Amino acid sequence: MFRLQCVRPCLRRLLHQAVGSRDYVLEGLQVCSADVQVLDVVGKNRTKLTVEHVSCAVRMLWDFQKERPELLRTVHLIKCHPQFLTLRVLAENKISLMDDSTLVDMLYAFLRLNVEPHDSLVQQMVSEAWRRVDRLPMSSLSKFAVILNDQLLHSSPLMGHITNILDQKLSSIDNGRVLAALMVSVSNLVSTRLRDALISRAECLLDTVDPLNYNTPRRMVQFLRSIKYIHRPLLEKCNEIFMRNIPRLDAENISIILGLYQSLQFNNCDFRLAAKERLIELIDTSTDPHSFSKLFVALAPISSAEIRERLENTILLVADEFSAHQALAVVEALEEIQSRNFSLLNKIASVIQKKLHIYRSMEVARLTQALFLLHYQNPELFAALRTILVSFLQRSFYPYEVTMLTRVLSMLPSPRLDEDVVWHVDEVIAQCNLSELNTISFAIAKWIRTDPSYRHNTHSKYVRLLQRLSQCGRERLQTANRLDLVLDETKFAPGEWFEEMLLEETFVTLNRMIDQINSSNIADLAFFLTRTNRLHPSLMDRIASVAIEHIDEIHFSATYPTLLPFSVLNYEPAHVDELYEACIKRFTPHISSFDPHLLVLLAYCLALADHFPEELIREIFSIDFLGKLDCQLESLNDSLKMRTKQRLMELNRAVCLESPEFQVPWFHERYCQHLQKKVNGSVSPVQQQIHAMLGGVLGGINFVQAAVITPYFYTIHFECKLDKHLKPLSYSGPSTLQISERGKVLWDSNSLEKARDELPAGAHRIAIDFMDSKSFCKNSHHMKGEALMKRRHLEILGYRVVQIPHFEWNSMELSTPHAWKRYLRKKILG
């Protein structure tokens, strides 16, 4: 009994301690179901709140908000609530007591609840997190990096420190979400080595990511866009996850993904078609301005004319409610589809004009460009935009920003440019890369054409600016030591100024870096050579040898740009057959993975060089493939759609003429007839001169026909017929065309259906083509692949082909009518 009496007080004391250890404040917070309830608990217990209580309250406030659609969030009400100020004061006073994860999580939540970055709470939390940055767990480091990125500190010393930590601890990251957020945040600071390591780790972690989590692969694609690097294996893995999630994607996410793909020039037919179907499904449920603006931006550029009209009619009803940024997105989409709905354009422009004060510099440049390209007529608005652009330009020292503002300013009509603007551009030029220098040169060229003072002052401000551009461009090329960087800066550079002032220096630089050509950059280099239209055997030989040796390291889709200069420029390196065989062997197992339009372009590239792989040809001319191509063409922009159709016709013609064993039918007759009637051809003065000379050589104008349409719809400049004794034969019927005084071709409405005259026994037709500069490489008299293929085809059709190069016809040797006639007689009659 005595023992029991001794035990009873101990039990009573333990029970009291257990009851007393319960955290009623924390329990009260955890049962809250709304932000107002959380703030009430804070108000009633402000003197009892610990770090754990403050952290829980702030986290719950943000959790309640992020679960709601953006339009239904009440962050502004929370921010104005007196108890939210209490939370901020308590958090600021307890920063030193927070553990690492709590510190970063609370900082993230406060910023999401619109606490200003310059608030003392945020600044002290950032400073404390910086002090602890080396010991932060990777998940917290990832979130802290996102916070810094949102505060535009993506190039700060602190972000550099985080990049270094990421480099050291990359192999320890086993969470795709953590890695993806870090990749995006440090994208401005990654080296080539770290870039490759990040991509390799991302590929591994994507295999472990929840297939329903599309945000992680979306951030990885965003990283590639930020560093302007196309890594197709990673893109394809991300695309597979997007495809699985199409039924769950909303218009905003689809719009973001399509925008990222467009920036990377990554076209995936399956995703575009699936996204298009999903967006059409969302039309009826997207009723508010926010969701419908996202839907319009994503769907309008890839939809049919009927769907576009429906979208434009609907958006006209909600346009007045658009925010400044929604109006900007919509006007850019209208420009992309070249809309002519002036009622809608006027309404969107009205919204923009009311909210001009909200836009930042690059946004003003974007909307000005869109309105100008839409041919919108509003002098008052454009005058206001010009004033704003000039103001932004004079305050900016970022090269990319100055370049964009300068380019857009040059679009606007103006008698002359302010001297201050010219001097400000001059101050920034030294920091610009080659692409930016080229863009500024375009702007200066436009100002020269519109400024009357230039005609009277050859030593004008524009001349000095152009000289400075050239000097900076040459210095940048001469000091460059990385091939990848030069290729990136010249990707969109070639233009009149660049070709005249910097192209030769660029090739000197590329030759200096020839040992840096490898499997990862040969596609970019080959594409650059194709666009410059210049033959450089040393570089192309190096491309060929790298491609043959490292073909397994080259992505199958990169075989197309790799082969392009060899086919287009008609260059045959020492091991040309081995090069084509290696590339064909590389892409053949992946034929079904190509986008339809890209497969057509690849096959045409091979046809130029007289290569017709059976598996590729049979795939392209199958019913299933042509049906898929038709579906894809509906979602492509007009220029790419027309180019693909033209290349398919030319490929069809080449296969019929050069590989009849495949038994592919010629199914482009009506397409060619329609195209021929639609095109308003013209005959150049030189061609008219040759036409007259041919009449003199052959014995009369009735012995020659001009602009003749052959079977399979080649147009040859002139045709004549010679009998077996090489005597000219006259044309009995009327000419298929007439030439107007201005050199326009006037087609007979029935000429395209007329059959060719039968030839007497032993006679033959001669096709005479004037070869202008487009038929040759720019830096030589080397004939290009397209002209050579046309010659092959005409010979198959029974013609003897006579080609008259422009450099021979316009040479000093042929400067008199007698010399021209002697030249033609020798060419035709031998």
Image: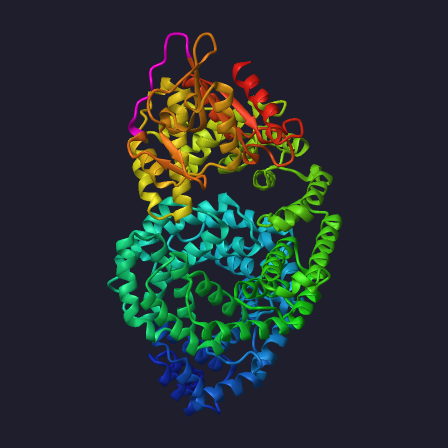
Which residue: 41% across, 30% down? 651
Q: Nearer the viewer, residue 684 or 133?
A: 684
Number of marks: 0
Q: Is residue 724 above or below residue 8?
A: above
Residue 306, x across and y down, in percent: 26, 55
Among the 4 quarters of the image, the one containing residue 430: bottom right
Q: Quadrant of the N terminus?
A: bottom left
Residue 467 left/right relative to 561 = right
Q: Nearer the viewer, residue 618 or 25?
A: 618
Q: Nearer the viewer, residue 558 or 204?
A: 558
Residue 49 in sight here: no
Q: Is residue 560 above or below residue 251?
A: above
Q: Quadrant of the C terminus?
A: top right
Residue 818 left/right relative to 694 = right
Which residue: 37% across, 20% down? 731
Which residue: 70% across, 64% down? 461
Q: Nearer the viewer, residue 255 or 165?
A: 255
- 6 drawn magenta: no
Residue 347 left/right relative to 80 = left
Residue 823 in sight here: yes
Q: How is the image coloured?
A: rainbow
Residue 305, x across and y down, in percent: 29, 53
Residue 395, x across and y down, in percent: 63, 74
Residue 469, x across and y down, in percent: 69, 57
Query: What stretch of residues is rendered in magenta?
Result: 752-763
Q: Main secondary structure of the magenta part?
A: loop
